Image (cartoon, rainbow, N blue to C red):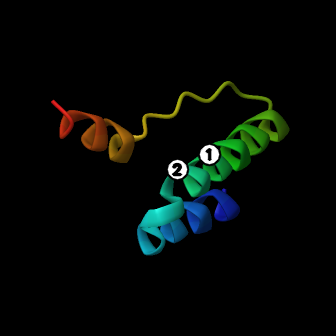
Amino acid sequence: MAAASSCREEAERDPARRDLWLQQASKWMALAAEQAGHALIVCDHLSVAKQDTRH
């Protein structure tokens, strides 16, 4: 989970590669969920907000 958090922070610092960092965060969160033996549903409010501004 710490790696996912770091990736999300990097996404904020590096807008040019934001999507890449958020994908990496998602991968780390999925791995953490697998290791914990739980299903994990992630709501990425940053991507939703980004999509909303396009309308």
Image coords of residue 27 (percent x, y): 71, 43
Q: Quadrant of the N terminus?
A: bottom right
Q: CA distance from mark 1 to mark 2?
A: 6 Å
Q: Amino acid at mark 1?
A: Gln
Q: Give the vertical position of 42 relative to 20 (above or below).
A: above
- Relative placement, left or right, of 19 versus 39 is left
Q: Give the vertical position of 29 relative to 16 (above or below).
A: above
Residue in view at x 43 percent, y 65 percent: 15
- Relative placement, left or right, of 34 versus 30 is right
- Quarter of the image for residue 35 reads top right
Do labels 1 and 2 touch, CB within 8 Å? yes
- Quarter of the image for residue 43 reads top left
Mark 2 Cα within 10 Å, few/some/many (few <14, many 20+)? some
Q: Secondary structure at mark 2?
A: helix
Q: Residue furthest right?
A: 35
Name the residue beneath numbered marker 1.
23
Residue in view at x 80 percent, y 34 percent: 34
Q: Quadrant of the C terminus?
A: top left
Residue in view at x 18 percent, y 40 percent: 53
Q: Secondary structure at mark 1?
A: helix
Image coords of residue 18 (percent x, y): 49, 58
Q: Amino acid at mark 2?
A: Asp
Image coords of residue 30 (percent x, y): 71, 37
Name the residue beneath numbered marker 2.
19
